[in-house]
Amino acid sequence: MKILILHNRYKFEGGEEAVVLAEVDLLKKHGHKITLFELSNKNISKGSLLKKILLPFSIIWSIDSYRQICELIEKEKPDIAHIHNTFFLMSPSIYYACKVKKIPVVQTLHNYRFLCPLGILYRDGKVCRECLDKGLFMSLRYKCGKKSVMWTIAMLAILEIHKRIKTFRKLINTYIALSNFSKQQFVDAGFDKNRIKVKPNFINFDPGISSEKSNFVLYVGRFSPEKGTDILLEAWKKLKLLPLKIIGTGIQFKEFKDYADKYSLNIEFLGQKPHNEVINYIKKSIAVILPSRCNENFPRVIVEAFACGVPVVASKRGALTELIEDRRTGVLFNPENIEDFIEKIESIWNNKQEAEKMSRNARMEFENKYTAEKNYEKLINIYERSIKNYQ
């Protein structure tokens, strides 16, 4: 099968980029011909003055992207196009290029961007459904786009214009949701449930389980309000004897590191690490922590932890309650109750026998659901059905 994969990289890259590369690698290993077309938001600031002036218009409809994809389809003649992200340089014009060239489109819903300008259904410290329930113009009222009126207007324009002309609903043949929770958010917003298929994240290698455990718990991710990293700092003021290692960076990194230094918290900030080093830290940890305040879609670190036989301590938010079975593959806590979080962390730390049982269950969960081969079966089935049903 010939597959065209389209992805607009974010300025600050994360799990989404890793998923794209993993799927490309998986498909190539199974003998498919892959054409990968990528743009990066890192290049926005490098454009000419004219391009910067025209940017508010090109992110709504990029003539360059439309032309490039039409030419690429003519040259490569793919059987299907798999789109991961079009924001911002690629723009939704590429859906129309695929339509003109009669190529079926599969879209992975990595976040909630079609429903929410921020893509995370989170605002001002709480889960938010205002744009789903009352319309996208609520984002302008709250300046959701980085608290900037102009950025909010730009985001609103993209979503509202393409909502009105039904770009995302008419020109996408199949949607891939990463969890049942994610699927339900789109169904609630009016998307056709029969065209949304659930295929979880995965990793395309098996890291195995380490017999050498170290006495620390681990957080891997961004430092940003919706990720709940402030919960870690508050809890560790009381958990001073329990070592915490943190891998990642983000807008609040310096602020939180200074706070940890001020209160002499037992936290080691490791910054960004290559993926192979991240996996080694996961393998040696007692547990991986996900203290998210937002409704998570499917953090890839869950699969990585399960593959390493490491239980996950996670907040009761979004798909986390679906992906982690409480007291079996990890423990769940109320992110609004810091004492509940502390109790759940201590329960794993102080009960090594229970932790070992959860470790075995986590590994079993990976083998049953999240291996590369099981993911390939789901993905290729989605492609084949999309091509067969294309009109």
Image (cartoon, rainbow, N blue to C red):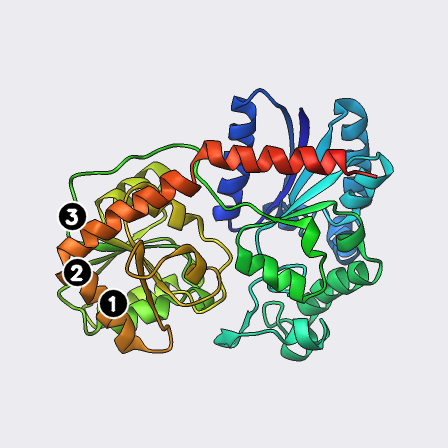
Q: Nearer the viewer, residue 64 or 158?
A: 158
Q: Secondary structure at mark 1?
A: helix
Query: Residue at position x 39%, y 46% from top?
Result: 303
| 3 or 1: tag closer to the N-terminus | 3
The kind of residue tagged 1 is Lys
Report the Cα–Cα distance between label 3 and label 2. Answer: 12 Å
State which quarter of the image contains the N terminus.
Answer: top right
Task: Find residue 25 and report its horizontal and vertical position in percent.
Answer: 52, 29
Q: Residues within 10 Å of mark 3 (few under 14, many from 20)?
A: few
With 115 as the anchor, is 333 left or right in this view? left
Task: Find residue 235 and report its horizontal and vertical position in percent.
Answer: 26, 72
Q: Secondary structure at mark 2?
A: helix
| 3 or 2: tag closer to the N-terminus | 3
Vertical order, 204 against 363 (above or below): above
Query: Residue at position x 69%, y 36% from top?
Result: 385
> Which residue was labeled with disc 1?
344
Report the Cα–Cα distance between label 3 and label 1. Answer: 19 Å
State which quarter of the image contains the C terminus.
Answer: top right
Q: Nearer the viewer, residue 85 or 172?
A: 172
Q: Total label count?
A: 3
Report the Cα–Cα distance between label 1 and label 2. Answer: 9 Å
> Which residue was labeled with disc 2?
349
Query: Residue at position x 72%, y 68% from top?
Result: 153
The kind of residue tagged 3 is Ser
Q: Nearer the viewer, residue 111 or 40?
A: 111
The kind of residue tagged 2 is Trp
Closer to the observer: label 3 or label 1?
1
Quarter-wise, where is residue 242 in the image?
bottom left
Q: Secondary structure at mark 3?
A: loop
Vertical order, 281 against 350 (above or below): above
Q: Is residue 150 among what the camera can see?
A: yes
> Which residue was labeled with disc 3?
214
